[in-house]
Image: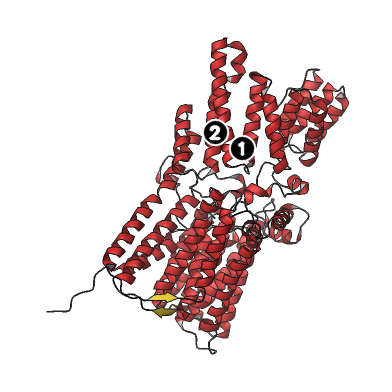
Amino acid sequence: MGKASAPAFTAESIAWGAILFAVFMTPLAMSDFGWLGIERPLTADIYTEAKLFVLRASTFVALAGWVWSVLVDGRPLRRTVLDPWVLALIGWLAVTTVVSVHPLTSLFGHYTRGGGWLTYVLYAALFFLTVQFADKGSRMLQVAKAVFWSGAIVSAYGVLQYLGVDWVRDTPAFLVGRAYSTLGNPLTLGSYLVFVLPVSAALALIERLPSWRAVYWAGTLMSLAAMLVTFTRSAWIGGVVACVLFVAYVVIQRVGIDRRIDLPFAGVAVTMLALVTWRSAAASDGVTNVFARLGELFQFDSGSGFSRVGLWKAAYDATLDRPLTGFGLDTFRLFSTGYLSPEYARAGDYLAIPDRAHSYPFELASTTGLVGLVLVFAILGIAAWVSARKTLLLPRGSARSTHILLAAFWAAAAGYVVNLLASISMPQTTSLLWITMALLLSPSASARPVRSVAGARVLATVVAGLCAVAVLASTVPLYADARYLASRTLPEQRARIEAADDAVRLAPYHNTYRTTRAVAYADQVIGSLPMAAAIDDSQRAQLRLEYEAALEELHAAREFSPWEQNNYNVLAVMYNVGGRYLDAVYHDGAIRIAEEGLDRFLHAPNLRLQYAIALEAVGRLDEARDELERLVDIEPRMAEAVVQLARLYVADRETGRATELLRAAESTVINRALVINALESLERGEPIPSVAW
């Protein structure tokens, strides 16, 4: 009889395939399939939730395969010098999650960001599992090819976006003219391409077949083009660092080049750089003009440079208040507005609430404390030192294909960390950093046999079953987000409320879902309030009951997340609307909520406007005027504040001052039509309409 053939699929091959699937598919995963003719996205968040699902599902499959391969197939356990440090980090982040200003956010991560404790556990699991299976040079090559092909697809789509071809609907205005591809943000795309560039170049250099060598160089050029048209300076700097480090290794190790192929592609790269630079030089804005974009690097008194410094200072000040544990993972949005300066408010989008410090070290310090910051960078430093000392420092000219790939991954990780100094960390990119660290440390890992366990097959089967359940459970956040999308888009109000209820029930940890549900309940009644004076007593009593029920929902959302500024904004508006149409006593509620919120969010413009409206309604005109003058000084672009202040000037018989204020605001406010209408009312001798709802 012939030798029995090996099974087509083993636990090891399934586990390793899951890791490769995560590397390849995570950057591509999204829920908007407009290019297939599907009418609307499948979820509200079309980028992060889909990518997190891929990461979670792949990790659970890999975990099941690893447990089976160890308990049943006898695979040894592989350990690295980094293991105790990773465990210490996970333990410390668990502590900061418990004492977080919002533990559920720190556990699961903020909506659309996903940077909570569970995501760091995911990073650690991916690191551990990759170490277990990346014990062959061929497997490092497989990871590199997965990075290349995924990066090629992502890059091609990004270049098409820059050229005006896009399949994603409702592109935000700030993204027009910039590549963001399937990553959803130019910063995230640029960060990802820092990995792709050196790895793609390494594949080209180790390939001996001319046709495939040309393919790899073509993909490298495509990634370079996509990185350029993200117009993301942190990625440019990180990419330069990664490429310089890798080129230095190639030169020192005398890695051979094929002049027939490599030199022509180098010429194409230079030509492409010149063409993109020439095309962007004609751009009139400061974002998609290369020269203006680079010039802003040295401008800290205006533009994005000023904005970044303002965010870093807010994070620094927050760290001083809670230096040991920080405010909790992924909570920057919740506490940042209490630390931003008035100058930052004037320079930026006054309605935007920053949810990232745009510097990973500052974000770590303010959310996980100085201990968390030290642990993360100790892990990065140890990984860099050990991998360089044991796998990269070879005799001159002795580099093999595996070492060239190791050098590319080392350079990519270094460039990515440099990029993070002034950028944001997202699961879809930082997960690749942890996989890369595993690849770099895998050659120096030690292997220890695992003792046989009674009932090993049964135990492995149970673990596999639990992992299968976990994969199925990973679909729940996707369905919750689909229901959240329905709560915002369905035309019938009752259906919107039902969808919002479903979203909160399925994912009760997202305060965004709870706020949206509360707003849906408020929308159900708010349209009827202007008719309160025209209906009979019984209908009015019923309307009041519905209004009170909506207030309860809004209060519940605020109590669930007292650090979310929007909860205070919506609640104050609701109280003022009720005070205007239902009962003046509700204005007192707006005052109470606004004062509570302004103690926490010093420069909250919408909340301060509602506060002034309520003060005016209860006759505290001088206080209302003071609040509006303060608001207009902080945010002169807010037309509603300007018009409301002009009304008070007219009431105090200061019509000239009101006219002067409105004339000056015509060229600065965002909603210019509101100011023009107020001026026309003044010219006709009519009262200026209130901006209150």
Task: Give yes or no for contact between labels 1 and 2 (Cβ–Cβ under 8 Å).
Answer: yes
| Residue drawn at (68%, 59%) of the image | 323
Q: Position of residue 393 (x, y in %)?
A: 55, 85
Determine which residue is flagged by label 2: 518
Q: Quadrant of residue 238?
A: bottom right
The N terminus lies in quadrant: bottom left
| Tag 1: amino acid | Asn
Name the residue rendered at 60%, 20% in the picture: 529
Amino acid carrying label 2: it is Ala
* Residue linked to disc 1: 567
Q: Position of residue 143 (x, y in %)?
A: 43, 69
Q: Quadrant of the C terminus?
A: top right
Residue 605, horizontal then vertical, whole percent: 71, 38
Q: Which structural element holds mark 1?
A: helix
| Residue 548 can be seen, yes or no | yes
As rendered, which of 565 and 401 lies closer to the eye?
Answer: 565
Q: Residues within 10 Å of mark 1 (few under 14, many from 20)?
A: many
Mark 1 vs mark 2: which is more N-terminal? Answer: 2
Q: Which mark is residue 72?
A: none
Camera sees residue 141 = no
Name the outermost residue toward the top: 536
Q: Secondary structure at mark 2?
A: helix
- In depth, the one of 154 and 84 nearer the eye is 84
In percent of the image, x 37 and y 54: which residue is there?
A: 471
Please provide percent x and percent y for residue 196. 51, 67
